[in-house]
Amino acid sequence: MARQMSTVLLRPDMILGRTLYDAQGRVLLQRGMVIREQYIKKIRNMFASIYIEDELSAGIDLVETVPVEIRLAMQETLSRQWEHWGQHASFERLTLQPGFARGLREQMKTLLQIVSHTTVIREDLSTLASFDNGTYVHSMNVAIYAMMLGHALQLPESLLIDLGVGAMLHDIGKLWVPAEVINKQGPLTAPEMAVMQRHAEWGHHVLAKQTELSYLVAHCAYQHHERLNGSGYPRGLTGDEMHQFGKILAVVDVYDAMVMHRPYRAGFPPADVMEYLFSRAATEYDLDLVSLFSQKVAMYPLGSTVQLSDGTAALVVRIHENVPSRPVVLIVKGPDGEPVEPEEVDLCQQLNLTITRTHATVIMESID
Ligand SMILES: [Fe+2]
């Protein structure tokens, strides 16, 4: 029972709709707590978007795609290895921590179980990230999305596990990109961009030497920035020179990266990113993968705010399994911006209505 809200619009006495965790996985604020004035600044410094609980959200049943304890365990596995390698200035002669590969594979098996029972991802996974654990949440989200696609393509289990492990480690080469480049809040200069782009090769270089990992895992790091038309890096591969895993990761990595909020810019609405992917499908991204992805991820996540073609504002309350792009919504404001008696409308029935805008702050303001 919760709806998504930009933290810009937080006000004292609102009720938290989903528990907030810090980067170490400790509880910051428990679901159901009243948000006090003194918490608001801290929350805004860590999160762009959270969930609140109120009368309007009463019919919205948020379902976690991956249970929180599994998500935190995955984050812990990744962060321990990441920090261990991060202490080394050079990536030559690095080894995995004992048990890491086995542990990660076990977690990917669990994730595969979850993914194989998930027809559509109904929540906005980017909201699970705080500004300081974005790297880990991004890696996990990429693994979830990649395995959703791989499972829909009916890949065998052993390949799906490799794909998941590869997705979790695809950006590991960023460990050796200087912090001032990684953390720069603004456009990179050409030399900075060149260093940043090396992360794909560096990740491949380190992962390829780890005998406990499949060589496909290293190729996930190597190929996730390649594009079908040869405009990607590091090698400018084209078409079927790219491995299927590279094609999958290209789609889901860019999706999650664009949807995710950063301290210096809001994330793009999922529907806008999906449209961007379609606009470049067949040139940069595999068209079949983009269309499959659009059926597996709700463009209008549960609890998000949308504007309809008649000018009314509404909340997404339920998402159909087969037509995730036309959810059931609860109209809460009229075209004049005034609150109305909440009315539920199924966009699969009311075909004359379409969603015209999504949860950008400007729309949120029209409700809150
Ligand atoms: Fe990357």
Image (spheres, rainbow, N blue to C red):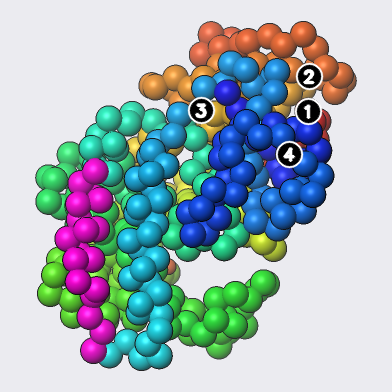
Residue found at x 35% / y 63%: 78
**Circle 3 or circle 1, nearest the eye:** 3
Q: Secondary structure at mark 1?
A: helix
Residue found at x 38% / y 72%: 82
Q: Position of residue 3 (x, y in %)?
A: 63, 30
Few, some or many residues within 10 Å of mark 2 (<14, 14–19, 20+): many
Q: Position of residue 87 (x, y in %)?
A: 40, 84
Name the residue carrying label 2: 333
Amino acid, disc 4: Ile
Could you tell which of marks 2 and 3 lies nearer the N-terminus? Answer: 3
Few, some or many residues within 10 Å of mark 3 (<14, 14–19, 20+): many
Name the residue carrying label 1: 367
Disc 2 to disc 4, C-alpha distance:
25 Å
Residue found at x 69% / y 19%: 56
Specify the quadrant of the image occupied by residue 37: top right
Name the residue carrying label 4: 35
Disc 1 to disc 2, C-alpha distance:
7 Å
Amino acid, disc 1: Ile
Few, some or many residues within 10 Å of mark 4 (<14, 14–19, 20+): some
**Circle 4 or circle 3, nearest the eye:** 4
Residues marked 4 and 3 touching at CB (< 8 Å): no
* Highlighted magenta segment, given as a residue range: 93-110
Could you tell which of marks 2 and 4 lies nearer the N-terminus? Answer: 4
